[in-house]
Amino acid sequence: MAEKMKASVLLRQGELEVLEVDWPVPAADQVVVRIAAVGVCGSDVHYFDEGRIGDFVVDGPLILGHEAAGTIVAVGAGVPADRVGERVSIEPQRPCRVCAQCKAGRYNLCPQMEFYATPPIDGAFAEYAVIQADFAHPIPPSLSFEAAALCEPLSVGIWANQKAGTGPGSRVLIAGAGPIGVICAQVARAFGASEVVVSDPAAGRRDVAHRFGATKVFDPTSGAELADDFDVFIDASGAAVAVRSGIRALAPAGRAVLVGMGADEFPLPVARIQARELVVTGVFRYANTWPLAIEFAAAGLVDLDAMVTGRFGLDDVEAAFGAAKDPATIKAIITPGT
């Protein structure tokens, strides 16, 4: 393999450059993947714009991008050689596997987690990337690389709906019709929800939600009020007012799952939570979701390909970030090979 590869590197806040960097050498339990497609996530844009997310600070060159798929081109000493040539979707994290959280099956909460594109771990806006062999999930020939890359945000939607207990007949309210909200709506329908209402102040985003699984959309600025009998509320907006309204819309024993990232702290309707015995929980990435994500995508229970609204090469990552801020964009994809 070549000793160098091209990568889009975040040098510092607001400054990207395509550089030649060292080709990744796999550890014994790793594989090298030639990257075919990488989705642009809001966290990538945030690192570019702000240089940090919470306690994670970009203090050196960093390769962004964590929604990735491609083809295995090399394997570590402990990985069967016949995996070379496999088309895979990358689960972009490396837990320690031995801490209490990992042993309990909650490896997403591993305190030693190494996650793509979270400082100082490089991501996948590059020609190649390495990942542990069991986190390079084989995909069927029918699944496009773009859909395989979007199994990462699909996993967020699956994890959120699993935490919410969404099932046949559930009435689900989702705040926010960005990519994660739209995916959460599709997953809720795939889980058997009979009603999926998506709330967003932007008319264009509400139209998108209608196309991707929502049975009804709601304008929170209209002055109208929602019913208060939803079984599930999933917040994909991070807006305090949306979280409070969504919790108030839950039926007794309902479940609220907070996915969107907003302010660190804001008031909640505690009396309502107590009186209706509501469950309020958060989502931090995902665990054990990839097999189901691949199955849903391959079976057409969710439509990931239709969510792609723009494709960009490594030289155009900053343009992709700009597109991601456009309400007309659902999902921008980086294709490092172009």
Image (cartoon, rainbow, N blue to C red):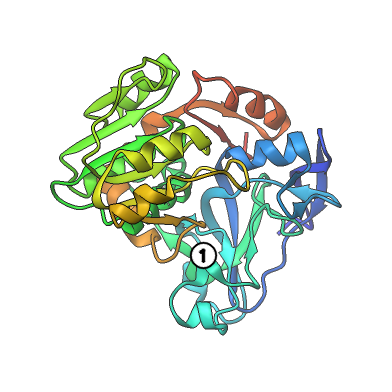
Q: Nearer the viewer, residue 69 or 237?
A: 237
Q: Is residue 266 left or right of residue 15?
A: left
Give the amino acid at mark 1.
Val
Q: Is residue 325 above or below residue 149?
A: above
Q: Is residue 125 above or below residue 328?
A: below
Q: Could one spot residue 173 in this view of the protein? A: yes
Q: Is residue 225 left or right of residue 131?
A: left
Q: Is residue 23 above or below residue 197?
A: below
Q: Residue at x 43, y 45 (%)?
A: 269
Q: Nearer the viewer, residue 221 or 311?
A: 221
Q: Is residue 126 left or right of residue 196?
A: right
Q: Nearer the viewer, residue 220 or 203?
A: 220
Q: Position of residue 1 (x, y in %)?
A: 70, 59
Q: Could one spot residue 74 in this view of the protein? A: no
Question: Looking at the figure, which quarter contains the C terminus?
Answer: top right
Q: Is residue 221 left or right of residue 95?
A: left
Residue under label 1, please give it: 84
Q: Position of residue 234 (x, y in %)?
A: 37, 44
The image quarter in which residue 277 lies: bottom left
Q: Position of residue 138 (x, y in %)?
A: 41, 60
- Label 1, secondary structure: give it: loop
Q: Nearer the viewer, residue 241 or 152?
A: 241
Decide: few, some or many residues near mark 1? Use Cα within 10 Å; few <14, some 14-19, many ≥20. some
Q: Position of residue 23 (x, y in %)?
A: 75, 58
Q: Residue at x 39, y 22 (%)?
A: 220
Number of numbered discs present? 1
